Image (cartoon, helix red, strand yellow):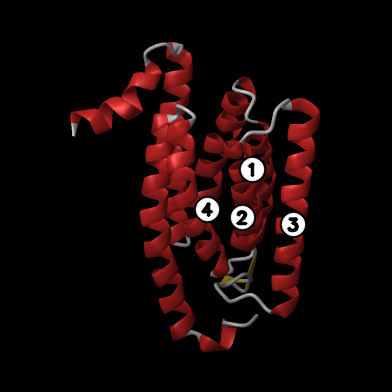
Amino acid sequence: MNQFFDFFLNTYKDKDTLVIILEAIVLVTGITSVWYAKKENILVYPTGLIATIISVYLLLKDKLYGDMMMNFYFSIMSIYGWWNWSRTINNEKVVKISRTNTNEKMIGLGLFILTIGFTYLVYSVFGGEITTSNYVDMLTSGMFFTAMWYMAKKKIESWTLWIIADIISIPLYAYRGWGMLSFQYFIFTILAIQAYFLWKKNINKNPQTASK
């Protein structure tokens, strides 16, 4: 057990105190944001913005351009999602939990492919040598980008993508020396699985909105 904790904590011995504090803030606000998302609570977005904005700085500092782009996009989509989730007509939510239709699936696939291609271009121009972990980063970036778009529209498929990408990100961030972020994605995976079943239960109760 001690070896397990040492694996995650040893990477922080030579890190600046400010970086450790900021990463801890990202850990707390990131987990809080996913918790709110699971509950379909609008606070998912302000808490998420704190995590993503700080992450942009940290990842840019560490030259992890794919991850940095992903968090920058998250920040933009959080603003859009905040607005979209808050819309009401006659005190009733305009955007409700539903499944993607064929058109949304095609848009999601296109966004996934474009994200991978663009992330590869960024690494080629700014990142120097592209390693195996960078290719994994491109894959997860595509999943996360698409998941965030689906999340802003309250599509249950967002959780499927979150789960897959979160699982991949656990060893990826551990390998890169970001122990707290690796642990964060472990928590994300658990919350995302719980959220999927909660949202699915909501859809089953309201089948008339499932395909909107």
Amino acid, disc 1? Tyr
Q: Nearer the viewer, residue 97 or 93?
A: 97
Return the residue at label 4: 165
Amino acid, disc 2? Met
**Residue in the picture at 39% in, 32% down:** 180
Above-or-below relation of 195 to 205: above
Q: Nearer the viewer, residue 201 or 106?
A: 106
Instruction: Say what secondary structure mark 2 lies in.
Output: helix
Q: Quadrant of residue 130?
A: top right
The answer to whether residue 86 of the structure is visible from this angle is: no
Return the residue at label 2: 143
Task: Give the percent coordinates (x, y) of residue 9.
Answer: 33, 24
Q: CA distance from mark 3 to mark 2?
A: 9 Å
Looking at marks 4 and 2 on the same chain, the residue that comes earlier in the sequence is marked by: 2
Return the residue at label 3: 113
Looking at marks 3 and 2 on the same chain, the residue that comes earlier in the sequence is marked by: 3
Amino acid, disc 4? Ala
Return the residue at label 1: 135
Answer whether labels 3 and 2 touch (C-beta < 8 Å).
no
Q: CA distance from mark 4 to mark 1?
A: 13 Å
Q: CA distance from mark 1 to mark 3?
A: 13 Å
Mark 1 residue crowding within 10 angstroms, few (<14) / some (14–19) / many (20+): some
Above-or-below relation of 92 to 58: below
Q: Quadrant of residue 157?
A: bottom right
Q: CA distance from mark 4 to mark 3?
A: 15 Å
Instruction: Say what secondary structure mark 3 lies in.
Output: helix
Q: CA distance from mark 2 to mark 1?
A: 13 Å
Task: Give the percent coordinates (x, y) of residue 116.
Answer: 72, 49
Amino acid, disc 3? Ile
Tally of numbered tags = 4
